[in-house]
Image (tube, coloured by chain):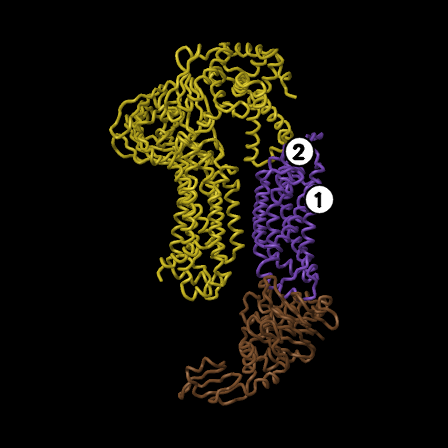
Chain colours: A yellow, B purple, C brown
Amino acid sequence: MSFLSYLRVETGRIFRSRIFWLAAVLTLCAPIAGYLFYFPATLNHESSIGLWIANPALAGTFGGTVLFALLTLYELDRVYRKEMASLTDTIVSTLMLSSSRTLSLLLAAAAAVVCAAVLYLPYTLYRTGALWDGGYYLFAYLGLMLPTVWSGILLAAALYQFTRRVELSAVLLTALVLLSMSQYVSDQFLLRWINPLVPWCSDYFGNLRVIQTGLYSRLLWLLLSASLWLLSLPAIRKYGYGLGRSFLKGCRKIYLPFTAFVLIGCGFGMYLCQPFINHSQMEYASFSSHPMSTEPKLTIDEVEITCKPNVMTGTQQGTATYKIFNLEKEDVVETFIMNCGYTIDKVTANGETIPYTDLNNDLNFEKQIEVTIPPGYVTLVMEYSGMPQVWNGLRGSLTGTVFSPEFISLEMCDFYPYHSFIEHGKLELTLPEKLIPISNWVDIEVNLISENTDGTRTWELEPPRGGYFGNLYAAEYIALETETENISAVFYCPKKQQAAMEEVNIQQILADVLEYCSAHYGTPPFAEEGKLRLIEAGIPAMMGGYAVDQTSIMSENTFYEKIYTASAETANSPEIMIHEIVHQWWGLGKNLYDDNTASNGWSSEGLTTYTTYRIIKEKYGEEYAKEHCVDVWQSQADYLKNNFYFRYPEYLDRLPEQYAARVRGSVDSIMMYSVVPLKILKAEKLVGGEEKMDEILKGLFTNQNLNPITYADFLDACGLTEEALELD
Amino acid sequence: MIKIFLYELRRILTNKFFVGLFIVTCIYSWQTLSGDIITGVANTAPFSAWSYGLYLGKTAPLLVITLLFFVTFLYSRKEKQVQSITSTTSFSPARYCLLRCAAMAVGYLLLSVAVIGISFFFYDWVFQFSDFGNLLLPILLILLPTFVFFLGLGMAAGRIFPPILYGIMLLVLIFGQIALPPVADLFGIQFYQSYPLTLPLGADGEPAFSVPASFWIGKILYLAAGGLLMFAALFKKKRTY
Amino acid sequence: MNISIQNVEMTYSNGKQALQGISAPLQSPSLIGLVGPNGAGKSTLMKLLVAGLLPTKGEILLGDSPLISKEKELKENLGYLPQSFGLYDELTVYQFLDYMAALKGIPQSRAAIEKAMAETNLSQYKRTRIRTLSGGQRQRVGIAQAILGNPKLLILDEPTVGLDPEERINFRNLFSKAAQDKIVLLSTHIIEDVQSICNRIIILHCGIILFDGSPQELILAAQGHVGMIDQMPAEKEEGYHITARLNTLKGVCCRIVAEELPPIAQAVDPTLEDAYMYLIAKEEKK
């Protein structure tokens, strides 16, 4: 009887087993948990893809894996429990029988997962509507769920074959499940087995990085579980031997341990060489990152860069040509910084290949490249390529530089090997034709220079500040214009979202915010000549928002329709959006800074948060604003006041640094975003109400002598003392 | 009698499950202390009775699972086969079962001592805190009712249909995640995180450790239910025909 | 010791009637062989005798009192080896017997254990973990725990299964010696064992006692119903109960059991096995 015949009879037997049908039906039911209470894609579970595809599929992954692992233990043990083994072992080789049994379980699991994918398809189509993403659906069920269920079967079979004990195997599997769900591995996509890391889902900007990391981690787990299973095959008990002697005997079939070790080696290789996350430290070291030399031994007059991202693989290939004058009479070793995921392919100086060293010293987002530059005028050409890596500190959220068919985001050293001495820079970027690039800096123009025949377009960036290209976002953007009496704005949102945004009248909402701020504080400096730009960035690049001169950038989760459509009682208020626009007044229009910020929390955030509250109060009513702003600040301030470490700071010094940093970070955040707004609110009452406070703030905003505005300036303007604003 | 007890204890303690679960519980205890407890619970000190209550509440499911594994030994297929011999001796089945419960209690106690010992070491190491007297009440409030209730439930379930025990183990893991009113919150995971926030603060800025009547009543009910179930499982006359 | 089984009936909850009103006195000293086909009710009767089951009708008396009211006394004097049983694999042979001795409340357990181990040839395995023992050795541990403390009532369900011929003979002798001052009830399919040692045989069939007496009485009852046929015609084989069949140069030589022997058969002295077969065949014919 051939292996296929055994496989056929085993598969037939499995499909006739009631327990299999129970496991299969429960697996089919498991995704329901993703609709009801299991929301692992937590960072933005409001997205349609997250709600209707990722969460159910991840629930199915968890449930299906547990169920099929238990089914595997049951089926493998049944042979011994029912004493069938004494009959079958005399007829067939235990190796063949065990292999066919496991393989038949894998086939049965595949059938169950495919059924689940088919079963939930109509409902998913109905719920996602225009946001349906077939590729993601296939990834969720066949790319995440199926390999995880398979690895569960293989691991269960391996553990059983090693231990020959159902209970012990179940305990070991439970331990593995607990470990996989523990905080130790929660932000490490490779170590999460039963609960693959899907931190976000993007409705409008693609999910390439999550798909890539998901598939990579599933492949790793499949490799490891398959290798463990292969290694367990020699451990199947025979000749009346125990584990050790059976294993030694079994290892005479040398191809089994050999293949297992090859697979384990591949797994370790995959773990060590994963291309997605860099090897920087977890905590942000400093904004200066790698130190650049301060005494130049050379000048770089110009750099010309051509970048060609490959959006299907998430990589890019580029060439940077530098015009350099080496002031010294000898070779100079100069350091460039670039994204940790890139590798230098070739460096030439005046056409000659010259040596370079990739220091691989990942720090924050970047690493250093040392290049030996000969004396005199040099045309240095650096060819580089690779996949940009996520900073290790953000490995749990998997956000950062990305090249994908729907969205591209690039930051400083993601463009090319960067050097701060560059006098002038020019960059040519070739993108798929539907992607429109926008720089976060209003003065960095992005011009279309050619439409290519291969469905791409080439854009040119020429920044006014040397070789610094700022942040660049490219998507299928459309521009929605908003005009008010004093200020106009343009909102760049994805074309796919245009109808939804127009439906909620986003232009009017933006206009309301702009009008409020202009009317209360005055117009920001740019208003006369230019427009305020609002850019919606994809969640693959960032969460939340930030503002730079004349431009506010917010991630897509700020613009979910339901934030703007639901009633005030249930809506998440559009706080982030308002907050980032208000920053054009407080923070950019007028900087708020204090030497004592660390202790008193005074920064742009406090006044911005207060203004956001005022706008929300005007728009949604006093009760709503109190509940969603003032009460939240108060509870945070109370939390801070009552917090043990705030009361007894001496204990903070006893904490290990990682925990102390966590506590300090939380204290700073509460001070800036809750305590200071409460103090401003108190000041508002003390100075005589909102109108009076608006006058004071307008005075501060328009006072040309004040930049930055310190806490003392604010207190003087209010005629109050620091003590008067102390909270109860 | 002591000899049987010692043999039973030896069988439990040398069991691979116990050893495995012991290691897992110790690791999990350390993880809980250094993860959830170190920053303090409900604004209280990490070594307050409230924080300690949450710590024990979080580790209790593992203790219960270990206990339920002990109970599965009573009702396993192998055990049934041995019972065909042991049940024909003059030793009273109820006393025999009680002895085995006592052995399980000692196993549970040892595991509890490990969990508590790890926490004391942690507190001393990180915070130089060694005033463990106030932690006694949360220890009793969590570990005792949990032991009695789940031993009773486990024995009753094992008597009816042993595989239910594995289902209960799964439920125990889920039980710890559900928000329950104080009267039903056996592990107190929700209770210890929310109730202290409703209490007035003392001179040291910490709410004094006092639990509401409903919490006490809940514990007493769990104790009583566990006792009744155990009694039913121990003394129900059984003849198979 | 004196046990009296009186009109005992046993019907399981699934409706299966295992015993149909059987009665038998058991007095020491005696070594009683309990035989019968599979499903005759032997194990049920044994479980009733060890108070593992309660009869649905009738009663079992220990002395003059119902067994149920003297369960403790019964168990204090009982050694029982079930047909299938389990042992604590993680203990050594000595530890397991020590454990059982504690359960049985045997004083000076060490001597009793040593004696039981010596009688069952287990002394050399004293410190061996039970999980490493062979099937026959495990069976011997089962017997050792049954005879531990010299109980007055020894009930053994298929005790010699899995033992080699030498061990079987040893145990037969052991049971025979033990029966000098107690009741030994031995359930077995091996008639040879019964013939060798039992002074009384009870044959159960479909829940009723077909025969209760000495082996000699059973043999006498079959006298004249057992014969040899040297050349058995193949077409006639189906008409008789054949207890032995030997292919010889002349043809097939058969030993048959029948109510009336055919003329070609030569009557021979019946063995206990022939007598058992005769009885069962007669009952089945009814």
Q: Position of residue A510 (x, y in %)?
A: 45, 18
Q: Which residue is mark 2?
A: B196
Query: From this viewpoint, is residue A399 visible?
Result: yes
User: Which chain is home to disc 1?
Assistant: B
Badge 1 amino acid = Ile
Q: Nearer the viewer, residue A28 or A150?
A: A28
Q: Position of residue A593 (x, y in %)?
A: 52, 18
Quadrant of the frame with the N terminus of chain A: bottom left
C8 vs A152: above or below: below
Q: Quadrant of residue A103?
A: bottom left
Sequence-wise, which precedes: disc 1 or disc 2?
2
Task: Say if labels 1 and 2 share a chain.
Answer: yes
Q: Quadrant of residue A420?
A: top left
Q: Which residue is mark 1?
A: B220
Q: Is residue A113 left or right of residue B16?
A: left
Q: Nearer the viewer, residue A120 or A523?
A: A120
Label 1: state its secondary structure.
Answer: helix
Query: Counting other residues with Cα less than 10 Å from the Cα at mark 1, is it few (<14), some (14-19), or many (20 or more)?
Result: some
Label 2: state its secondary structure.
Answer: helix
